[in-house]
């Protein structure tokens, strides 16, 4: 996990519902793996966002959704 991924990982985990941390960690690990093997694309992101937002505390969904929809891929920034 690179520094940007680690920051995103910690940011997300702070906003996840109680009891959903392990599920969020697995989903983040999956996304980081796709970034490392260059299979992280718009199609994957379209499925990833609703899966991740379902794990978030309600008060953080809008904030995190905006960040994820502004994400430009593995070489972009969030």
Image (spheres, grey):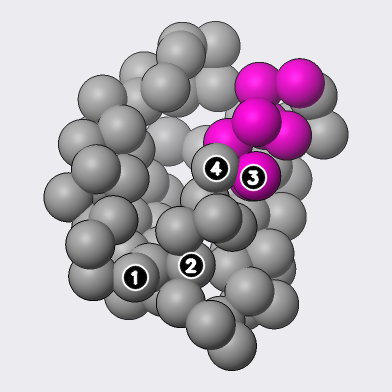
- What distance separates the C-alpha of mark 3 from that of mark 1? 15 Å
**Any part of residue 71 in sight:** yes
Q: Name the residue under label 1.
A: 57
Name the N-terminal-most of marks 4 and 2: 4
Q: Mark 4 points at which residue?
A: 11
Residue 71 versus residue 34 in the image, above or below: above
Residue 22 versus residue 45 in the image, above or below: below
Residue 42 versus residue 73 in the image, above or below: below
- What distance separates the C-alpha of mark 4 from that of mark 2? 9 Å
Residue 39 versus residue 25 in the image, above or below: above
Q: Mark 2 points at which residue?
A: 16
- What distance separates the C-alpha of mark 3 from that of mark 4? 5 Å
Name the N-terminal-most of marks 1 and 2: 2
Discs 3, 4 touching: Cβ within 8 Å: yes
- Nearer to me, 64 or 32: 64
- What distance separates the C-alpha of mark 1 from that of mark 2? 6 Å
Mark 3 or 1: the one toward you: 1
What is the crowding at mark 2: few (fewer than 14 residues within 10 Å), some, or many (at least 20)? Answer: many
Name the N-terminal-most of marks 3 and 1: 3
Residue drawn at 64 percent across, 45 percent down: 9
State the image coordinates of residue 52 (x, y, percent, origin top left).
41, 64
Name the N-terminal-most of marks 4 and 1: 4
In the image, 6: left or right of 47? right
Discs 3, 1 touching: Cβ within 8 Å: no
Q: Mark 3 points at which residue?
A: 9
Residue drawn at 59 percent across, 57 percent down: 13
What is the crowding at mark 1: few (fewer than 14 residues within 10 Å), some, or many (at least 20)? Answer: some
- What distance separates the C-alpha of mark 4 from that of mark 1? 13 Å
The residue stretch that appears in magenta = 3-10
Dividing the picture into quadrants, the one containing residue 14 is: bottom right
Dividing the picture into quadrants, the one containing residue 27 is: bottom right
């Amino acid at each position: 996990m690179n520094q940007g991924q680690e920051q995103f990982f910690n940011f997300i985990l702070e906003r996840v519902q109680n009891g959903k941390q392990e599920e969020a960690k697995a989903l983040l690990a999956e996304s980081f793996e796709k970034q490392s093997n260059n299979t992280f694309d718009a199609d994957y992101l379209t499925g990833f966002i609703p899966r991740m937002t379902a794990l978030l505390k309600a008060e953080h969904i809008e904030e995190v959704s905006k960040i994820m929809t502004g994400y430009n891929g593995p070489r972009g920034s969030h």
